[in-house]
Amino acid sequence: MTRALRRRSRGPPLSARVSGHTSWGLVDYAREICASGFPAIHALPPRRQRAQLDGYLARIIDRDIPDQGVAVRRPDTLRRWMNAYAAASSTSASYTTILDASSAGESAKPAKTTTIAYRDLLAQIWILDPVPAWTPAGGHLSRLKLAPKHQLADPALAARLLNHTPETLLQPRPGSAELLGQLFESLATLTVRAAAQAQEANVGHLRTRDGGHEIDLVVERYDGSVVAIEVKLSATVADSDVRHLRWLRDELGDRLADAVVVTTGSDAYRRSDGIAVVPLALLG
């Protein structure tokens, strides 16, 4: 693999050279989703990875939350809520929707205040790591929706909560492709956040209140410059896949340093409209 994004040359916006090739495909990304970003777990064989992740999740419920001074009276309820949150990865589903999904079929649902306490505690110990809504300085784009996009700290935790392996994520059964797309975005988010931190940048997401425009990741550096990123579980990119990036380019003008579609394809390149196309494997 070679690095995809080169240093920007002087010239018009979105003109940096983009190139590179990777042999990675869907099988590799499914494996990477389930392998965990924790180095000590990533190096293990799959069976031991699953055992370590299951132990980690059990420790969160049995020890980490009680250590914060909160008694978990119904561990099964907390586990189901975490499962529902995992299923909502890379979405901005309301917490009411997550609560309803976690207690489907129950006549006595847990109180909303209880699940909010779960959420706050899990965020406090860095198990939940939602992507905040991007709010540009100066009140520009005031019609943006402010709900966060749900993410766990590691997509492997979501896969384990939902009892998925690389093989089951790739099976042609109802919901598998959608979930694989959500967790692929989770993996991309983890990668982008690591790179952004090194560049003194923050990562958010963008969605207008009417749902007419949304962009998966918006990276804003300390000087206000922005890189907009769409994540697609696809090896190819169509014009319809970049329409939101084009819209944001028109809105931000020179503030937009680059616009990128992250894919599962093999080659990095720049489209004729200036939008970069980069396989996720070439970002990190």
Image (cartoon, grey):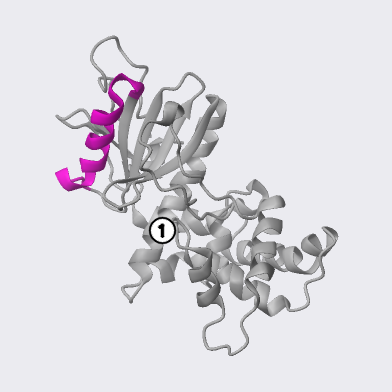
Residue range (magenta)? 236-256
* Left or right, residue 234 beside residue 165: left
Is residue 116 depicted above or below 241 in this figure?
below
- Amino acid carrying label 1: it is Gln
Q: Can you say whether 179 is above or below 110 in the image?
A: above
Q: Residues within 10 Å of mark 1 (few under 14, many from 20)?
A: many
Residue 117: say if magenta: no
Residue 56 shown left or right of residue 104 in the figure: right
In this view of the protein, can residue 2 be seen by the observer?
no
Q: Who's the residue at 61% across and 66% down the image?
A: 50
Location of mark 1 (residue) = 182
SS under mark 1: helix
Residue 95, placed above or below residue 102 = above
Residue at figure coordinates x 52%, y 22% from the top left: 222
Q: Residue at x 32, y 27 (%)?
A: 258
Q: Quadrant of the N terminus?
A: top left
Could you say where residue 242 lies in the image, as x and y percent from the top left? 22, 41
Image quadrant assignment for residue 277:
top left
- 259 or 165: nearer the eye? 259
Q: In x, y percent, where is residue 103?
A: 56, 80
